[in-house]
Image (cartoon, grey):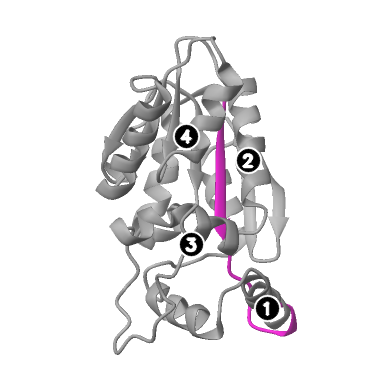
Amino acid sequence: MEKDKVFAQKKDKVQPFSFNREVARVFDDMLERSVPLYREGVRCQARMARRFYRENSRIYDLGCSHGNLGFLIMEQFGDSPFAMTAVDNSLPMIEKYRSRLEASGALGKIDLVCAGMEDIGVTNASVVIINLTLQFLDLKKRTGMIQEIYDGLLPGGILLLTEKIALPPGVINDLVLDEYRQFKLDNGYSELEISQKRDALEKVLVPETADAHLQRLTRAGFARTDIWLKWHNFASFIAVK
């Protein structure tokens, strides 16, 4: 695993964060050191995808990056057939995903699409998964995106959504931000790396409160919603149609 040093050197001007080739190359290390409970979360999602998948339907992974979840889902299904579409608007991520599938002899098992998740259309789905991706979508488009997913899900289908969340200003928010900063320091990031990445993500990653997500899911029509995993300012939601 190549070590993430994207923000290790002092930059004269920090550019807005993008999922370019440099990021794609070190993305596994970036995930492990930046996203609490990442591995546990995607393993559980893969098991839930297997549980809720219905024959002749489709799984959608919207914001699939380079395929960690897809490989876990393939592992869950084994030799059992399933249909899955993996979508990401970063060509370097899709290219890396395709290379991984080819190297493992699994090319063709998952349909890869390089596009924005709001552009592909969700139909005949039993499982839709969005990991840390809705937060990059324009705020004005998020309600429509969730509604499209609801409309494209079969009855009994699920949406699994993981997001970095915002908290109201105050003592709890201060505690959460300090804990997250310490998490990254404990994982080997420097104060410079933390600061420069925060600057790069400003206005690119726009988090919302957990309540805002739950209210949007309910307004879309989901019958049951819950937070099934939470670590301070990261939350994983489940919504059942």
Distance from the alpha carbon under mark 2 to that under mark 3? 32 Å
User: Residue at (67%, 36%) from the top-left corner?
Assistant: 44
Label 3 packing within 10 angstroms: few (<14), some (14-19), many (20+)? few
Q: Which residue is mark 2?
A: 238
Label 2 packing within 10 angstroms: few (<14), some (14-19), many (20+)? many
User: Residue at (37%, 25%) from the top-left corner?
Assistant: 123
Tag 4: residue type? Tyr
Viewer-proximal residue, 173 or 194? Answer: 194
Tag 2: residue type? Ile
Q: Which mark is residue 150?
A: 4
Q: Which residue is mark 1?
A: 173
Q: Which residue is mark 3?
A: 3
**Magenta-tinted stretch:** 157-173
Tag 3: residue type? Lys
Left or right: 79 in relation to 151: right
4 vs 3, front mark:
3
2 vs 4, front mark:
2
Label 4 packing within 10 angstroms: few (<14), some (14-19), many (20+)? many
Closer to the chain start, of discs 2 and 4, is: 4
